[in-house]
Image (spheres, rainbow, N blue to C red):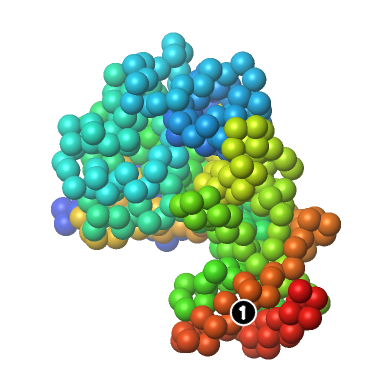
Amino acid sequence: MTDASRARGSAATGNGQLTLPLKVTGTSTQSAPVGRQHVVVGLFAGIGGIELGLHRHGHITALFCENEPTAGAVLNARFPGVPLHADVRTLTSLPPRTSLVTAGFPCQDLSQAGMTKGIAGTRSSLVGEVFRLIGDSQVPWVLLENVPFMLQLGGGEAMNVIATTFERLGYRWAYRVVDSRSFGLPQRRRRVYFVATNEGDPRSVLFADEHESPEEPSRNGHAVACGFYWTEGLRGLGWAVDAVPTLKGGSTIGIPSPPAIIMPDRTIVTPGIEDAERLQGFPRNWTKPAEEVGRPSARWKLVGNAVSVRAAAWIGRRMRRPGVPREYQVSSLSRRKTWPNAAWNIGEGRVAVECSEWPVQTKYISLEDLLTTKKLRRLSAKATRGFLSRAGQGKLRFPDGFIAAVEKHLKTVSKDE
């Protein structure tokens, strides 16, 4: 029996383990499933990153649900004519012909869901509203997006509630952690994309593409722009070569938190909001309408909380043109405190999947080329001094020459300020 035939005919053995071969680089002989143009409802829509990506492959949006006024201003301006509902809790039903519900729901909400059991226990939480709406209508496809922390939240119980609820509602599901750099964006942004369906195979969306994750880049003596967070220093330094760390939503009181970038000439700068939008795959000034109802600084929170447009476009392409699932090494998924980076249940039991976080490799935009030079601001002396103070107190290890470059930057900006 060939590897391919073993993969297609594999099933759970008596001890709960699945017998699948190591990943095969070729594709299966199965026929590709048929896709469709989806009618989308975006819950917790933010500024429409998922929907913008989906629209690029012909899907259409029938309704948004978003309670943040600044985000609502962006949705109204960028998706004219699409109705906007403010509170998911008062949304009684989905529009007719809805075939796909998307939701980038708050991760913190899972902490409540994770303390309960099943769909009844999630009624009082926001993620429970997603289940309420799809349960009432049996919408055929669902796309969830969240941070990887959801895989360990509540000791793994939160993910168990989500998976169990979909299974009780009759859905097959699959999820995968994907890095935005896979789509050519110089931002190291890892997110969980979770697809559930009661009419197809979710693997045809998330697991039809596979590219080996490259090794983490190093400068190797070459001068390239590198990103880090000047607000850190004691722990958790988000250092990224030729990229920025994950863009953040900022503080709870609306103070922007852009990353710092050390340029090839050792100048340390922070990007403008337009560059942040492009790092998420949005056109420049996508969030400009937010200033009509809020402070300009609110745009940073909107961008930091958004879904990468290019990642959503990849999913939109595969929903329109599903692919044949690749062949992966899998193992049975038992109850655990931390869920794996990829898994599925297509009706034969839950399995953990060994795959990369780079389903494709798009031509990469270097960080230096993406930045708008006229919009860059030098990191202030106060911010630089604070970072150096924290770095001196902590035990973090930094790249060779990095601290010396920060100290030199401090001397330069101190003179000018």
- Residue 281: x and y in percent read 66, 45
Identified at 58% across, 55% down, the residue is 256
| Image-quadrant location for residue 19 | bottom left
Vertical arrangement, residue 52 with respect to residue 18, above or below: above
Q: Residue at point 36% right, 16% down?
A: 93
In depth, the one of 145 and 139 nearer the eye is 145
In this rendered view, identify the residue nearer to me: 290 or 127: 290
Q: Is residue 36 above or below residue 176?
A: above
Amino acid residing under circle 1? Arg
Rendered residue at 24%/45% (across/down): 112
Answer left or right for 94 relative to 326. left
For the C terminus, which image quadrant? Answer: bottom right
**Residue occupied by mark 1:** 385
Q: Position of residue 18 (x, y in %)?
A: 28, 53
**Number of residues whose C-alpha sits closer than 10 Å to that of mark 1, classed few (under 14), some (14–19) or many (20 or more):** some
The percent position of residue 10, horizontal first and vertical second, equals: 31, 48
Closer to us: 415 or 93: 415
Q: Residue furthest top?
A: 96
**Residue 6, horizontal then vertical, whole percent:** 37, 50
Residue 371 seen in the current view: yes
> Which quarter of the picture shows residue 49?
top right
Write the residue at 48% across / 86% down: 393
Residue found at the far right of this picture = 374
* Label 1 residue SS: helix
Drawn side of residue 318 relative to residue 332, left or right: right
- Name the residue furthest front: 417
Residue 103 in the image: above or below residue 176:
above
In the image, 151: left or right of 216?
left
- In front: 306, or 85? 85
Query: What number of labels is visible?
Result: 1
The reply to whether residue 316 is visible in this rendering is no
